Amino acid sequence: MGSIDTQVHNAFRTAVVPAAGMGTRFLPATKTVPKELLPVVDTPGIELVASEAAESGASKLVIVTAPGKDGVVSHFVEDLVLESRLEESGKSHLLEKVRRAPNLLDVESVVQERPLGLGHAVGCAEQALADDEDAIAVLLPDDLVQPCGILDLMARVRAERGGSVLCAIDVPKSLVGSYGIFHVEEVQGVAEPDVLKVLGMVEKPTLADAPSTLAAAGRYLLDRAVFDALRRIEPGAGGEFQLTDAIALLIDEGHPVHVVVHRGTRHDLGNPGGYLRAAVDSALDSPDYGPGLRRWLLERLELEETVD
Ligand code: UTP
C-alpha cells in the first residue's frame, strides 16, 4: 500500500459505462438513435461521461452495449476522412471537437445480449478487466453530474475507508418517491459532513418510509467484490438483476460502503424533461449559444406571463 495520494491516483483504471438499456422513455427517438448519442448542446452524453472518467484518471472505458447499438462505440473511433476534410477546409475548431472523443482514453465494448438490468450489465464488464484491477468506476451515461470531480472525492474515501463508494444527491422531500434513497449514518472521525456510511437503500420509498433525502446518482466506485455479489443475487423488480441488490448483499456481509454527497447539479438525460433541462443549462453557459438563448428565453417567458 502506498500513500493515500498514490492510492487515490490509482483507485481505478477502468470506467464502465452501461449503455445497453432500451431507452424506452425516449421513444420514438431511441428507435434508431441510442440515447447515449443524443447531444447536450453539441456533445453526446456518452462523450461527457467519458471525459469525466478520463479526468478522474481512468485509462480505459468499457462500454456495455446492446446488439445493434454499435454507433455508441463508433463515436470513439477516429474518422480520418472527416478529419482530413475539416483540415483542408480550415475548420480547426470543428476538427478539435471531432478528435476529442477518440483521444480521451482506450475504449472497449462488451455486449449485453439481453437487457437483464443494470446489475447484469455491470457484470458483463468483468471480462474486460485485468487480473490486478481491484476496483472499477461505473458511470451511468444518463446522469450528468457537474461540475466533474466527484469520482476524485470518492477515490479518496475508498483510499481512507476501503470498500465501495457511491454518489448521492440531496433531493427535495417531494421527490424521494422517484429515487433509490440511502439509509446512512455519520462516520466517526470524518471531518467532511458529506461523507456518510451506507447502512442500506430503499427503492422509491414514500416520504414516511424514506430514511433520508439522499438519492443515488449514477456514479459508483466499486470494489471488485461486486462481481461475486452480482453472481449471487436473484432477479429483482421487473425480472432485472439490480446493482443495488448486489451492493445490499455486500453491506450485509460487512463490506464497507460509503456515500459522498454531490453538491453540484445533476440532470437525468434518460427522459425528455431532464434532457431538456440539461441542454438548456449547458447552453446558457456556452459563449456561443448562451447570450442568444437567454434573450430568447426571457422574451418567450415574458410573453407567456402576458398571456397568463
Ligand atoms: P435505465 O433503466 O435508466 O435505462 O438504466 P433504460 O433501461 O435504457 O431506460 P428506459 O427505462 O428504457 O427508458 C440505467 C443505465 O443502465 C443501462 C442503461 O443503458 C442506462 O445507461 N442498462 C440498463 C443496461 O446497460 N442494461 C440493462 O439491462 C439496463
Image: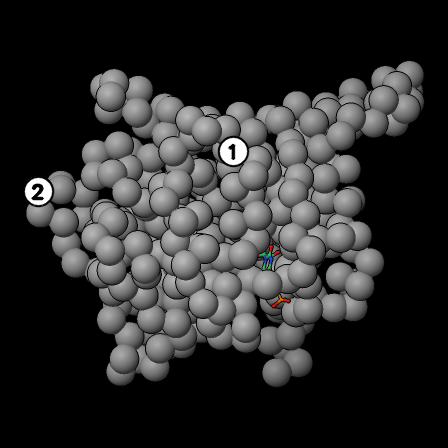
> Image point 68% across, 30% down: which residue?
101
Q: Amino acid at mark 2?
A: Gly
Q: Residues within 10 Å of mark 1 (few under 14, many from 20)?
A: some
Between disc 2 and disc 1, whose residue precedes?
1
Residue that label 2 marks: 189
Which quadrant would the N terminus be assigned to in this image? top left
Ligand 1, seen in the image, is in the quarter at bottom right
96 relative position to 199: left or right: right
Q: Position of residue 171 (x, y in %)?
A: 36, 65
Residue at 83% from the left image edge and 27% from the top image edge: 79
User: What is the residue that sits farthest to the left in this orientation?
Assistant: 189
Camera-nearest residue between 162 and 144: 162
What colour scheme has been applied to the protein in the rendered image? one colour
| Residue 99 visible in rendering | yes
Q: Which label belongs to residue 198?
A: none
Residue 269 lies in what quarter of the image?
bottom right
Q: Identify which residue is drawn at 28% across, 42% down.
A: 163
Q: Secondary structure at mark 2?
A: loop
Q: Amino acid at mark 1?
A: Leu
Q: Quadrant of the C terminus?
A: bottom right
